[in-house]
Image: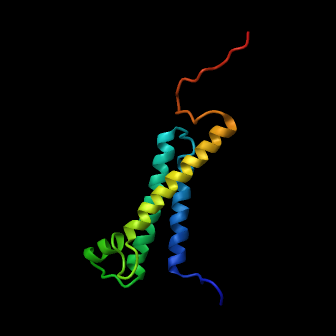
Amino acid sequence: MLGYGWDWQLFLSVAGFGLAIGMGWLLRHHRSLLPMFGGSVAAAVLFYAVSNLGSWFLLPYPRTWEGFWQAQTIGLAGFVPAWVFLKNSILANLAFTALFLLALRHRTGEWPEPQGALVAVRVRR
């Protein structure tokens, strides 16, 4: 068979993406910049936690607090440390959120407004 098969690691990745999408769905009505960037960071941290928790269960880590901490921080020997993945995910999410907001600004000419904010309205007479 070519490519990857359906295994537990793939299931955990899909579950992590699903949780991030669900969190975005819950934040869909918060249209100010802080919830958008905060949700972006939270999505990266949530995906990281789900995927590394699965790695702790599925890969040869000790089933102790030290093994859990190793899975969350340095990872397995011979690979890039796990925290680098988290750092890069957060930076990428922030960059893409900023790009999407800039595209929104370019398209509509306005920034997302906070809920309940006073907005200037032009009144016809």
* Occupied quadrant, residue 65: bottom left
Towards the viewer: 37 or 98? 98
| Residue 109 vertical placement versus 78 (above, below) | above
* Occupied quadrant, residue 60: bottom left
What is the x, y in percent for residue 83? 37, 66
Residue at image position (60%, 43%) is 102
In the rendered image, the residue lying farthest to the bottom is 1
Q: Quadrant of the C terminus?
A: top right
Number of callouts: 0
Q: Is residue 124 left or right of residue 17?
A: right
Question: Can residue 46 be seen by looking at this rendering?
Answer: no
What is the x, y in percent for residue 113? 56, 33
Question: Can residue 76 be seen by looking at this rendering?
Answer: yes
Looking at the picture, the colour scheme in use is rainbow
Towards the viewer: 27 or 37? 37
What is the x, y in percent for residue 84? 40, 66
What is the x, y in percent for residue 117? 52, 27
* Occupied quadrant, residue 121: top right
In the rendered image, the residue lying farthest to the top is 125
Q: Quadrant of the N terminus?
A: bottom right
Residue at image position (51%, 57%) is 92
Towards the viewer: 19 or 36? 36
Residue at image position (58%, 81%) is 6
Q: Is residue 28 left or right of residue 71?
A: right
